[in-house]
Amino acid sequence: MGKRKKSSRKPQAKKKKDPLPSTFPCLFCNHEHSVTVKIDKKAGIGELSCKVCGQHFQTGINYLSAGVDVYSDWIDACDSVAKDAANDSGPTEDSTQYQSLGRHGGTHPDIQMTAGEGHHSDRPEGYGQDII
């Protein structure tokens, strides 16, 4: 048995690569295809701008970077700014009240204890005692 003749083989078609998107949705105004990316590889800068709301963003790129990379850097930068803003806003009024109680007991500021009530007064009698 021999190999098949090469003339009987059909030429293989090259796989088409899907092109990367060149326009993106804006994170601030939520318009589809409003964000465009310009890449200057000589200067090493990728610039992103929204046609509708006017948002601009610049980031450093390398020779392998594409428009998608600039867009993903923009998303990461927006997330980090949002997290920093959430951390800088500080704790809320309720959380500061509970933080002052700590792990060692205390009560909620709205609950008042009468004389003779201890920390474990809400437990049934005999609960948590050692049995000999």
Image (spheres, helix red, strand yellow):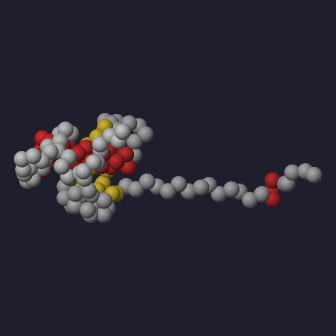
Residue 37 on image: x %, y %: 31, 50
Q: Quadrant of residue 118?
A: top left
Residue 10 on image: x %, y %: 74, 59
Residue 62, compared with residue 91, is above or below; it is above
Q: In which quarter of the image is residue 131?
A: top left
Q: Which residue is drawn at 93% across and 52% down?
A: 1
Q: Residue at x 12, y 45 (%)?
A: 96
Q: Which residue is drawn at 17% across and 42% down?
A: 105
Q: Residue at x 24, y 50 (%)?
A: 125
85 on left or right of 14: left
18 on left or right of 51: right
54 on left or right of 4: left
Q: Quadrant of the C terminus?
A: top left
Who is closer to the viewer here, 120 or 87?
120
Residue 21 on image: x %, y %: 40, 56
Taking the image as drawn, is residue 89 in sight?
A: no
Residue 43 on image: x %, y %: 31, 36
Who is closer to the viewer here, 80 or 132?
132
101 on left or right of 19: left
| Farthest residue, direction right | 1
Taking the image as drawn, is residue 30 in sight?
A: yes
| Farthest residue, direction front | 132
Q: How many marks?
A: 0
Who is closer to the viewer here, 49 or 110?
110
